Image: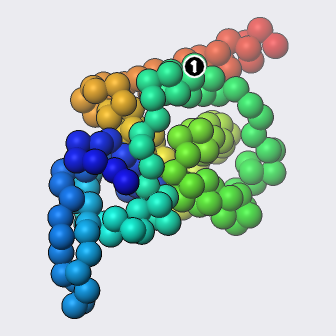
Amino acid sequence: MFQVGDKVLYPMYGAGIIDSIEEKEVLGVKGQYYLLNIPHVNMEIMIPVGKAEDLGIRQVVNSEVVDDVLRFFFEGDTDPVMFESNNRFYRDINKKKMKSGDIYQESEIIRDLTRKSNLHKLGMEDNNMLHTALQLVTSEIVQVKCVEMEKAVEMLQSVINQAKDEKEKQEALG
């Protein structure tokens, strides 16, 4: 059970803070609810305490995990089939990764779609997926590193730009 003040991640919504735990009556049934404040989307969500685990809500990762994600962001291969312009199979895989709430899997989405965008313009669905994954990862960085959203975006964008610069250097030398 989470406590008031805990920093948690709600898959597909992002990281936030448990503001309170309240007794509420919903549809005639009394129960305890977390009031989760997700600041990056200016949203408060009531979550039944007993369903939090089923919904994938978890504590945010620690600072070392964020450092690890940023350090090894572009390591790992991307399946070349993903680069095909209209590949529903990989979109479905990315949706599952997104729903997992796992920061490593969300980072893989960013890595793979960034690589794909370097080859050709992303379609609307891929672009939305990339934007959502970026928001989820940056929202967790905000909570873990205790920085403003702008700083978290800057940290992530720096890693993405560094990887692009490395790729351009390799191509120039290659």
Give the left or right position of residue 29, taking residue 141 as reference: left
Q: Quadrant of residue 139?
A: top left
Residue 91 screen position, x and y as percent: 65, 60
Residue located at (59% from left, 60% from top): 95
Q: How is the image coloured?
A: rainbow
Amino acid found under the numbered disc labelled 1:
Arg
Residue located at (61% from left, 44% from top): 105
Question: Can residue 173 be seen here?
Answer: yes
Residue 82 screen position, x and y as percent: 74, 51
Secondary structure category for the residue under label 1: helix
Give the left or right position of residue 164, taking residue 145 as reference: right
Q: How many marks?
A: 1
The quarter of the rendered structure image containing the C terminus is: top right
Residue 170 screen position, x and y as percent: 73, 14
Q: Can you say whether 30 is above or below 173 in the image?
A: below
The quarter of the rendered structure image containing the N terminus is: bottom left
Residue 15 screen position, x and y as percent: 35, 46
Q: Residues within 10 Å of mark 1 (few under 14, many from 20)?
A: few
Q: Nearer the viewer, residue 144 or 4?
A: 4
Question: Can residue 131 be seen here?
Answer: no
Residue located at (25% from left, 86% from top): 29
Residue located at (74% from left, 64% from top): 89
Give the left or right position of residue 71, taking residue 135 as reference: right
Q: Nearer the viewer, residue 18 or 173?
A: 18
Q: Nearer the viewer, residue 21 or 113?
A: 21
Q: Can you say whether 8 is above or below 143 in the image?
A: below
- Check disc 1 and report the residue beneath it: 71
